[in-house]
Image: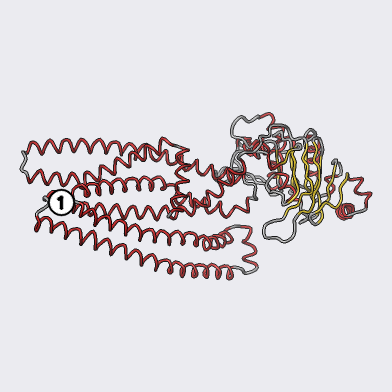
Amino acid sequence: MIKIIKENYFVLKKLFKLNSIFIVVASMVSLLNGVSMGFVNVIFLGYLFDLIQTKVSFSYLINVFIWFGGYLVITHLIYSLYEKYYKDIQIDKLNSSINVKLFQSVLKSMESINEIREDFLFVFKGIKKKGPTYIDECMSLVFNISMLITVIVFMLKMRQNFFILVFIFQGSYTLFENKIAGFKSEQTVAEKKYYKKSEYIDRVFYLKEFAGEIRILNLKNILLSIFRNNIQEFTIKKMHWGKKIFYYQMLAEVFKIVILYVSLPIYAMYELFVLRTISLGLFAAIMNSIGSIAFNSSSISNSIKFFSESSVYIEKYRKIVVKEDNIMGNKKHFKDKINKISLDNVSYRYNNQEANSLNNISITLIKNQKIAIVGENGSGKTTLIKLILGLLKPTSGQIRINDTDFSLLNKNDYYDKVGCIFQEFNVFAISVKENISLKENNIDSKVLWNSLRNVDLIKIIEGLKNGIKSELTREYDKQGVTLSGGQNQKLAVSRAFYSKFDLIILDEPTSALDPQSEYNLFKKIKEYFTHNIMVLITHRLSSVKDVDMIYFMKEGSISEYGNHEELMNKNGDYKKLFEIQASKYK
């Protein structure tokens, strides 16, 4: 229970920080509504019965109801303004802010996105599932607690014996419901494993990259068998939890019936008819309070279950957000240009692997240099780039930016100065100009058109109906433009020409282009990137003949380095691979 309170308190603090006025208003409205309902359903009813018994005048009763009606109109007006006009807008803003914070935390993480992907998807699903109703559930809890307290305080003031019975019921009922909430929380954690497997099989069946192999290799029977077995195992587990939940739920309900619906009414009737120690009005109030207490207790119980399930998602959310805060907080701001990047004896080992993926890498990247990192697949090129980009932390060794330890720098400042065109590039479902500039506003059209000219896309974009305003892909717009693979890659490369980065990394930027287009593009790249650090990762060695320094990687180490002429004179791995590739074009 303490853990549930701790996790949900963490989220409430975040929500309060994001929109404190709304949280205060929502709490006050719920509190006022709860007290009002307790007063109307119990206290006023008893008061009315007692008035009738004392035979007050009809005009007095009319005045009472006029005042009572006015009170109801005011409270209903306040609640309606909050519920119909104010609440939904503020909740949408809060949910949006929470999602943005999650996205920012993931993107700023020092770890590979793949390493936190599972937690991210789990949390994102939790936000979609619980987010829209989280504030409502918080306010429901405030409402039910305030109404329950109003009724209990009334009973304590009027008849302490009734209060003792209610106290025994409420304490026991809460213990039972806490047990049930604990089982629900365990169930939510365990469900993650089964949902993950089912979702994987779902994706395999609908993603086009798997379609061919599933049909040709006849994998559908294996996958369907795994899917069925997963459901069967999950069903057995749910039955196990269901039995425990049913047991405690029955105990709670039996206890409720015995205390609230049997013992309390019998005792109230005994005091009214035998002892004659309570009035008819108080008897009516006590009988009505039974329904209120049962309703409030059940609602509070449902809220506890909700917050218990939510705490599982919050724990993961907290893990991502706090990790990002720890990474980004207390870091040195980096406002200078990137003039030099040094790696000193840097090694890296992925989790759960016995051997290093990189071993004792020592290289220096200097401003105005064009550098190539080459080697066969699996040699460690991608891991090295991830370290330079700050997506991974070295297992050993040190990375320095302008002679400052990379781990001490604020990564946001660093990323503002770094551009990277990946081999597995993406074209987003936004306009052409937004895809290139990676901005929504303040786009320099002249620079943007020059970027398109540099990658030989200007005629293609000019030919589109809406030019640079054309929406790419048909994700949201059926009139969206779909470019070819080569055109998409040119578009991705144009981003590097648009933005002036201190460090630009090009990871196989021409893999989808024909040899002539590749030659023309590389010529433009080499002419353009003369006043920064340019790092080119490629397996086509003909593309790196004119760079200043080439690092040849083999089995996680740099086996050779130098310019093209120097490496050819060494008669090593670089020369062998270059000649093998060159022979294919003879």
Residue 329 place in picture, x, y as percent:
60, 40
Above or below 577: residue 503:
above
Q: Name the element at disc 1.
A: helix
User: Which residue is painted at 6% across and 40% down in the image?
Assistant: 56
Name the quadrant containing residue 265. bottom left
Residue 223 place in picture, x, y as percent:
58, 67
Quarter occupied by the N terminus: bottom left
User: Which residue is painted at 48% across and 55% down in the image?
Assistant: 312
Name the quadrant containing residue 498. top right
Instruction: Judge whether residue 146 can be spotted in this image.
Output: yes
User: Which residue is painted at 76% across and 37% down in the image?
Assistant: 403
Taking the view exactly as shown, the residue that stands out farthest to the right is: 569
In this figure, what is the number of numbered marks? 1
Instruction: Judge whether residue 586 can be spotted in this image.
Output: no
Give the amino acid at mark 1. Ala
Decide which of 498, 400 is in the foreground and name it: 400
Q: What coloring was used for the rendering?
A: secondary structure
> Which residue is tagged 1?
284
Decide which of 102, 251 is in the foreground and name it: 251
Q: Is residue 237 left or right of residue 489?
A: left
Q: Residues within 10 Å of mark 1 (few under 14, many from 20)?
A: some
Residue 13 place in picture, x, y as percent:
46, 42
Q: Is residue 434 left or right of residue 126?
A: right
